[in-house]
């Protein structure tokens, strides 16, 4: 939606050079105000402003791509070699195994198959969502066909634990699925009954030894994804796994 709003403005900036060339060729631009062509200093200020605006637009439009690139580098080059479950391929495999349980649980309103996969917060928030659906008389038509892509967008500390404990990893999932809320008479109030590409944000929280699913939300629900001001993780050399309750740390 934000990108569509920027299209007219971007087109205007793209056409601006034609207007400037007309001035350089001595052709008086046709304007509603009938002003004379801009002087050199005014044109310089115009182009400086245009460059600044374009830089700001690019920062907004490509913010997610920059976040993904930075997070991928950390997962693959910095953390993954020492904590294998942080490697992006391992994360994708974890998501591929977890996602079918999530979608089945949404459809049946029963997340018991996610025991060991998710945090207490996830179960509590899901139970509250299920209760809201019941009160509104809605059914969640949910069927996952495939997880198409997994985009890592940010990784940062979210608690007092020493990393890797209490490290949160934010992902954007592209999925092929049916995902909609339906009234008893068949009226769709959210989503679509068609098999189509949908997106969800996932937040995984590490318990020191493995990932746990902590939150899921849809992009259209307006959750702030500005991850630039989040706390910074310490260097991986200072990370330590917590001891297990039944003996030494598990092999890495």
Image (cartoon, rainbow, N blue to C red):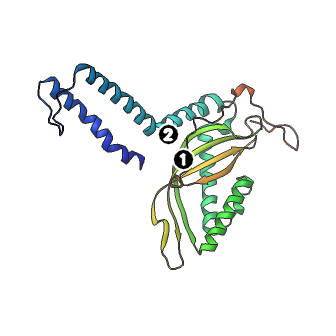
Q: Residue at x 74, y 40 (%)?
A: 159
Q: On residue 220, which mark appears?
A: none
Q: Secondary structure at mark 2?
A: helix
108 is higher (above) or lower (below) than 212 = below
CA neighbours of label 2 inside 10 A, class few (<14), some (14 to 19), many (20+): some
Front of the two marks 2 and 1: 2
Check disc 1 and report the residue beneath it. 172
Q: Residue at x 68, y 50 (%)?
A: 214
Q: Does 71 sit left or right of 205 as displayed?
A: left
Q: Are marks 2 and 1 in contact (CB under 8 Å)?
A: yes
Q: Residue at x 52, y 34 (%)?
A: 69
Q: Position of residue 244 (x, y in %)?
A: 84, 41
Q: Secondary structure at mark 1?
A: strand
Q: Position of residue 93 (x, y in %)?
A: 61, 46
Distance between the Cα atoms at labels 2 and 1? 10 Å
Which quadrant, please, contains the C terminus? top right
Q: How many marks?
A: 2
Q: Position of residue 135 (x, y in %)?
A: 63, 73
Q: Does 7 sit left or right of 34 as displayed?
A: right
Query: Which picture quadrant has residue 120?
Result: bottom right
Q: Position of residue 186 (x, y in %)?
A: 49, 76
Q: Nearer the viewer, residue 104 or 170?
A: 170
173 is higher (above) or lower (below) than 64 = below
Q: On residue 64, which mark appears?
A: 2
Of labels 2 and 1, earlier in sequence is 2
């Amino acid at each position: 939606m934000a990108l569509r709003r920027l299209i007219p403005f971007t087109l205007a900036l793209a056409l601006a050079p034609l207007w400037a060339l007309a001035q350089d060729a001595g052709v008086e631009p046709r304007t509603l105000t009938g002003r004379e062509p801009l002087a050199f200093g005014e044109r310089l200020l115009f182009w400086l402003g245009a460059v600044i605006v374009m830089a700001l637009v690019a920062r907004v439009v490509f913010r997610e791509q920059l976040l993904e690139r930075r997070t991928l580098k950390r997962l693959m080059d910095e953390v993954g070699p020492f904590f294998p479950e942080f490697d992006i391929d391992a994360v994708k495999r974890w998501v591929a195994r977890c996602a079918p349980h999530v979608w089945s649980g949404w459809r049946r309103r029963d997340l018991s198959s996610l025991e060991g996969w998710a945090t207490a917060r996830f179960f509590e928030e899901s139970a509250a969502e299920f209760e809201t659906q019941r009160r509104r008389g809605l059914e969640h038509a949910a069927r996952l066909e495939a997880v198409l892509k997994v985009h890592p967008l940010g990784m940062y500390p979210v608690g007092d634990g020493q990393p890797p404990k209490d490290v949160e990893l934010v992902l954007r999932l592209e999925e092929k699925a049916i995902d909609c809320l339906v009234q008893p008479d068949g009226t769709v109030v959210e989503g679509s009954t068609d098999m189509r590409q949908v997106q969800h944000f996932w937040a995984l929280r590490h318990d020191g030894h493995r990932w746990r699913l902590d939150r899921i939300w849809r992009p259209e629900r307006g959750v702030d994804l500005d991850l630039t001001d989040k706390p910074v993780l310490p260097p991986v050399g200072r990370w330590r796994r917590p001891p297990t309750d039944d003996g030494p740390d598990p092999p890495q």
